[in-house]
Every structure is written in C-alpha cells, then in structure tokens.
C-alpha cells in the first residue's frame, strides 16, 4: 500500500507539472509528456529514498559536492538557457523547467544507485 501511495503521489505531481507546462507555458504535447515523466521519476525517487533529502552522516566533502551540484543545476537551467536565445519566453521557461527536473532526477538516480551499491557491498 505504501508503494502505491508513493506512485500515485509522484504521478500526480508529474502530471500536474506536465499539464501546467502544456496549459500555461508552451502548448507542446511532447514537451509536456517529457516534463511529466521527468518529474514523476524524480519525485518518486525522492520520496522513496528520504535519505536523499537529509542525511546526518554527511561529511564536509559531501556537503561541498552537494553545493557544487546545486550551483551547476541552477547555472545550466537559468543562465544556460539565456534570454538572448531567439526563443519565446514561455518556451524558454518550459525548457528550463524540463532541464532542471531532468538534472534533479539524474542526481536522484545516481545517489540511489550509489546507495544500493554500498548496501550490496556491505
């Protein structure tokens, strides 16, 4: 039942973000589907592995790498898709939303994989 609840919650959030992207930002169906899939996957990983969000056993190196990763995510999604590109504002925001969600999801996949590898090695 717990897994079903997590799946429904993450699918709901992903569909809401995808639908909002399609309705209010840029009316492209494929972009909306991609946003929905990315955010559904990311939210599912984040709520399935609560230690991804907080962990008391972090050391200084882990904290620094987390900060660098966060800075990189923000730089790419906000500055990399800059206002000087010849795109509509709504399309630029939609692509930034997709890029940010994709990078957060890939980070969550990587941390989940690493934690599973560490558990299997122990």
Image (cartoon, rainbow, N blue to C red):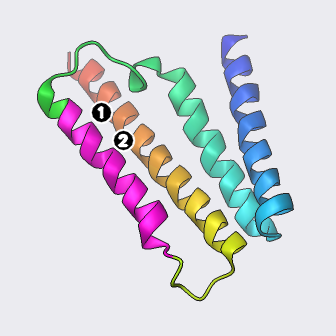
Report the residue at 59% width, 89% height from top: 86
Count all numbered tags in the image, as a single digit.
2
Q: Nearer the viewer, residue 6 or 19?
A: 19
Q: Is residue 78 magenta?
A: yes
Give the quadrant of the N terminus: top right
The quadrant in which the C terminus is found is: top left
Image coordinates of residue 72 in percent, x first then y, are 33, 55
Magenta part of the chain: 63-82
User: Measuring 67% from the left and 55% from the top, which residue is drawn there?
Assistant: 35
Inter-mark Cα distance, 2 to 1: 6 Å
Looking at the rendered structure, which numbered label has been put on residue 114? 1
x and y percentages locating residue 114 in the rendered image:
30, 33
Is 80 within the magenta?
yes
Residue marked by disc 2: 110
Position of residue 26 in the picture relative to residue 47 (left or right):
right
Vertical comparison of 69 with 31: above or below = above
Q: Secondary structure at mark 1?
A: helix
Q: Quadrant of residue 96?
A: bottom right
Taking 87 as reference, is 83 left or right? left
For label 2, the crowd category at 10 Å Cα-Cα, with few meaning under 14, some 14 to 19 and many 20 or more, is few
- The secondary structure that dominates the magenta segment is helix
Mark 2 secondary-structure assignment:
helix
The residue depicted at 78 percent of the width and 44 percent of the height is 15
Residue at (43, 40) in percent of width and height: 109
For the residues bearing labels 2 and 1, Cβ distance under 8 angstroms: yes
Whether residue 31 is situated above or below residue 43 in the rendered picture: below
Q: Which mark is residue 30?
A: none
Q: Nearer the viewer, residue 97 or 84?
A: 84
Residue furthest toward the bottom? 86
> Which residue of the protein is positioned furthest toward the right in this rendering?
23
Instruction: Left or right? Give the position of 60 relative to 105.
Output: left
């Amino acid at each position: 039942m717990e897994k079903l609840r997590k799946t429904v919650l993450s699918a709901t959030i992903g569909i809401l973000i995808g639908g909002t992207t399609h309705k209010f930002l840029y009316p492209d169906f494929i972009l909306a589907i991609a946003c929905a899939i990315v955010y559904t996957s990311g939210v599912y990983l984040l709520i399935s592995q609560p230690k991804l969000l907080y962990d008391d056993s972090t050391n200084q190196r882990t904290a620094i790498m987390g900060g660098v990763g966060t800075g990189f995510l923000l730089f790419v999604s906000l500055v990399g898709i800059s206002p000087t590109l010849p795109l509509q504002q709504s399309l630029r925001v939609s692509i930034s939303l997709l890029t940010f969600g994709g990078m957060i999801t890939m980070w969550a996949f990587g941390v989940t994989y690493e934690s599973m590898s560490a558990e299997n090695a122990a």
